Every structure is written in structure tokens, then in C-alpha cells.
Image: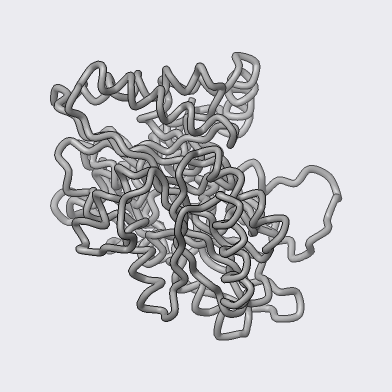
């Protein structure tokens, strides 16, 4: 028997797909840079089946790539054509919501939005939130240590995890399904797998930490005249307003493009920056804070959403779907010290427009957690030409000692630039961990390092 026959015997014939039966989805994540389908696509229904599949692939020395909702932007789930892909879509479901410990046990293939709803049904709140909540899966969120719009208050995906179950390259199941907030009994093994992008093990289940519901949220849009004032507004809001749930800054090029396309005129004139500020404080308290901010010159204007519809309109500009229609669009996700983001945006824009004078370059991001996103639409040469843009964006970033990946992972697209953010000794330690847990190098080969 060959490997695929062995996999069919272990998982069942319907769980092993080849050729056209796989469809096009396994070829690429949302970066649309993948060009090849995997050798086969497995659809296991349990941790035991994931273990059996990895054991067989490990024995045969065949590389394996785990795939979730395929919403990533770094090529981290893209096959090169010779791997066996494992889709976790059928490993789906919420096993338990524990109100006493404020936690939930979920399978890796469960969509994030499904987990959010289940928490809400039990009077609790799952803090992790992404724009792709309806299609991204928990396993992918954890394997990339996803961020999102609530990081400023609750932290990254890593902070929402109490325990994890993962399968190692040889099929060994490591079940560390801790449910306690405090547990210092030896190494915290879950952190080996969170953020490692499937290169050290395949996450199959997790215990997620829940919170009390934040209550009613007041959504505000502020017009700001300089990046220094954006930072000053952030610090003032944290110190004198409180209850900050989101702080999203948009540079004028980004805000103006999307607002015009959506036919939304939110301010009488354009401003260099617009900031979405969300707080759990009541509208009256927020209004008093904004009035003082206007008096002090921190903001030029402000709107308070008086309904859910108005809040959604404000967020629709931030979500930026119109900008996705620009030709040759490349999206970047970087982080750097908050105080230097404004200078980096100016330097990066200048460097790109020196090469392509008519390029669209716009910035937006969480800022309060040091994360900024960049949209670049330029007439670069097809194919390898996109890497010329990469080299400019990450090259300038290196001058500011930033990170090439704030929340989307490294995958394949950012791997050549890892040296801008990690020292040789750090990369050597990563390789040592990889060698220890995956000596044959079969897990997601060619990704991260």
C-alpha cells in the first residue's frame, strides 16, 4: 500500500481528497500568492485522526501543512505542491462553556464567530475579535497569535488561552488542557504552539479564557491634525477616560479613499488623521472628555455614534473594503514603537513614491498596541516585482527597529526579511526548537524559518 491508501484506511475514503475533488481553496490563503494544490487534502474529524495522519506522514517522510479558514495574509498555509494538507474544518465544535472558571473548550476548526456567540449565550465575552471572524478558525488564530481590534484592552490571542492540545510531527498528542489562570508547574507548553504557524505541532483543541461582557460601548470618531496629537489623545483617553476597547487610527489617504467610495461624509473637511475611539463609558462621559480634548487642541472635531447603524458606518471606513479594489494591492502588517510610527509612515511613503511616483500608499492601524497596516498599490512588475515593494517597506522598517509581523505571522512572504526583526541568536534558537520537535522537518516546511 502507498501513503494515500494508508491514510484512507486510517481516516476513511471520504476524508482523503485528491485532484479536482479538493477544489481551489487549498492552493492559497488570502494573500492569493499560492499557485499549487497540495498532493492531497485530508479532512480528519478528531484529534485521534490527526494523530494517525501525522504518524503515517512522519514515517513516510512526507511534508504536512495544516490549513484552517485560509484567511491569512502571509502565505503561511500555502502548499508548494508536494505536501499533504490537513484541513481542520471538520474538527469543529464547542465542547464546553464553564461559567465558573470563565473558560470554554473548543476544537481547532471552530470559526471564531461561533465561539463568540457561544460565550455570549452564557453571559460571557470572548475578547479575540477579527474582521474575518465568520470564516477564520480558532486553530489558525492561535497558530498565528492573532491580534485584532481588542488587543489594547485584552491582549493578543496568546492572552486568551489557558490550555492547548496539539499533535507533534510524529503523531504524539500533547494535551495540556489547563483551565486555571495560575499554573506554574514547569514549562508553559502552550506557548510552543501559539504563534509558531504550524511548524512545531498542529493545534487540535484549546481552552479559551472568557471575560465579563464589557457592556454598552460608545463609539467615537475623532479628527486629529498630527500624529503627535494622535498619541497624546491615546494617552489622555487611557488616563482620564478609561474603559478603552479600541483605538484605531487612519491616515487621511486611507480614510478619505474609503469614505468617498462608501459615500460617507463624516466631517465637513478632511483631516490628516481620523481615530475611532471606543470606550465602555457612557456617551455623556465621553462627550465631556471630547469637549475638553477640543478645548486643549488634541482634536479638531468629533462624532459620537448615536445608534448601532452609525457605529457600523464609522467602522465600515476602517474595515476598508473599497480599498481592496485598487490594482496590484499589497497589504502589510508591521509594528514599531508607538512614538515612531508617524515618522516611519512618512519615510516609507517617500521611499515607495520615489520608486513609483503615482503609487497609492496609505496607513491605518491599532496604534495603541504599536501595530500599523500599510496598503500599497503600485505598477510593480508582475510576479517577483512585488518583492521590490516588500524590500522597501521592510528595509525602511529595519531603520526603525520594528517588527515585520505584528499579527499576521511570517509565513513564506515575510521569511526573507525575518533578519530585520530577529537577531542571529534568536533565529538559531528557533531552528533548535524546530529540530527538537520536528527532526524530519515535515511540519509546514519552508515557513517562518
Q: Is residue 13 above or below residue 325?
A: below
Identify which residue is drawn at 59% across, 67% down: 279
Question: How far from the left and from the top, in percent, is residue 188?
Answer: 75, 46
Numbered-mark total:
0
Question: How far from the left and from the top, in percent, is residue 364?
Answer: 40, 45
Give the quarter of the figure containing the N terminus.
Answer: top left
- Here the colouring is one colour
Which residue is outermost to the right?
185
Asked whether, in this view, residue 365 is left or right of residue 27, the answer is right
295 and 432: which is toward the camera: 295
Q: Is residue 402 above or below residue 16?
A: above
212 and 86: which is toward the camera: 212
Asked whether, in this view, residue 400 is left or right of residue 174, the answer is left
**Can see residue 202?**
no
Question: How far from the left and from the top, in percent, is residue 373?
Answer: 41, 41
Identify which residue is drawn at 51% across, 41% down: 371
Q: Is residue 368 above or below residue 435?
A: below
Question: How far from the left and from the top, in percent, is residue 3?
Answer: 34, 43
Asked whether, in this view, residue 99 is left or right of residue 364, the answer is right
440 and 134: which is toward the camera: 134
Q: Is residue 101 above or below residue 235?
A: below
**Can see residue 27?**
yes
Identify which residue is drawn at 35% across, 19% down: 391
Which residue is outermost to the front?
295
Asked whether, in this view, residue 341 is left or right of residue 18, the answer is right
Amino acid at each position: 500500500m502507498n501513503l494515500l491508501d494508508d491514510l484512507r484506511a486510517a481516516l476513511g475514503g471520504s476524508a482523503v481528497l485528491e485532484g479536482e475533488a479538493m477544489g481551489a481553496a487549498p492552493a492559497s490563503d488570502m494573500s492569493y500568492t499560492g499557485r499549487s494544490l497540495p498532493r492531497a487534502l485530508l479532512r480528519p474529524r478528531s484529534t485521534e485522526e490527526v494523530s494517525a495522519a501525522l504518524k503515517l506522514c512522519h514515517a513516510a517522510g512526507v511534508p504536512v501543512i495544516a490549513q484552517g479558514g485560509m484567511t491569512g495574509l502571509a502565505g503561511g498555509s500555502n502548499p508548494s505542491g508536494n505536501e499533504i494538507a490537513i484541513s481542520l474544518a471538520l474538527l469543529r465544535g464547542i465542547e464546553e462553556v464553564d461559567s465558573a472558571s470563565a473558560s470554554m473548550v473548543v476544537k481547532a476548526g471552530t470559526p471564531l464567530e461561533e465561539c463568540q456567540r457561544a460565550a455570549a449565550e452564557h453571559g460571557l465575552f470572548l475578547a479575540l475579535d477579527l474582521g474575518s471572524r465568520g470564516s477564520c478558525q480558532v486553530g489558525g488564530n492561535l497558530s498565528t497569535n492573532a491580534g485584532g481590534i481588542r488587543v489594547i484592552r485584552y491582549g493578543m490571542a496568546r492572552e486568551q488561552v489557558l490550555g492547548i492540545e496539539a499533535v507533534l510531527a510524529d503523531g504524539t498528542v500533547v494535551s495540556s488542557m489547563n483551565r486555571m489562570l495560575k499554573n506554574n508547574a514547569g514549562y508553559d507548553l502552550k506557548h510552543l504552539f501559539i504563534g509558531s504557524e504550524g511548524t512545531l505541532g498542529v493545534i487540535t483543541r484549546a481552552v479559551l479564557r472568557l471575560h465579563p461582557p464589557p457592556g454598552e460601548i460608545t463609539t467615537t470618531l475623532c479628527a486629529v491634525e498630527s500624529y503627535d496629537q494622535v498619541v497624546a489623545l491615546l494617552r489622555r483617553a487611557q488616563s482620564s477616560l478609561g474603559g478603552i476597547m479600541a483605538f484605531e487610527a487612519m491616515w487621511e489617504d486611507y480614510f478619505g479613499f474609503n469614505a468617498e467610495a462608501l459615500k460617507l461624509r463624516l466631517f465637513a473637511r478632511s483631516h490628516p488623521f481620523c481615530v475611532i475611539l471606543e470606550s465602555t463609558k457612557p456617551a455623556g462621559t465621553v462627550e465631556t472628555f471630547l469637549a475638553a480634548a477640543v478645548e486643549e487642541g488634541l482634536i479638531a472635531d468629533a462624532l459620537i455614534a448615536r445608534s448601532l447603524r452609525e457605529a457600523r458606518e464609522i467602522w465600515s471606513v476602517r474595515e476598508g473594503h473599497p480599498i481592496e479594489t485598487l490594482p496590484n494591492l499589497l497589504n502589510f502588517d508591521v509594528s514599531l514603537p508607538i512614538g515612531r510610527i508617524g515618522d516611519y509612515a512618512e519615510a516609507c511613503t517617500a521611499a515607495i513614491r520615489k520608486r513609483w511616483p503615482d503609487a497609492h500608499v496609505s496607513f491605518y492601524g491599532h496604534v495603541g498596541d504599536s501595530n500599523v497596516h500599510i496598503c500599497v498599490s503600485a505598477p510593480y512588475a508582475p510576479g517577483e516585482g512585488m518583492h521590490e515593494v516588500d524590500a522597501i517597506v521592510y528595509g525602511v522598517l529595519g531603520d526603525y527597529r520594528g517588527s515585520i509581523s505584528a499579527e499576521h505571522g511570517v509565513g513564506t512572504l515575510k521569511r526573507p526579511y525575518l533578519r530585520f526583526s530577529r537577531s542571529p541568536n534568536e533565529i538559531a534558537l528557533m531552528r533548535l526548537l524546530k529540530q527538537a520537535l520536528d527532526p524530519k522537518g515535515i511540519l509546514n516546511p519552508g515557513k517562518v524559518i
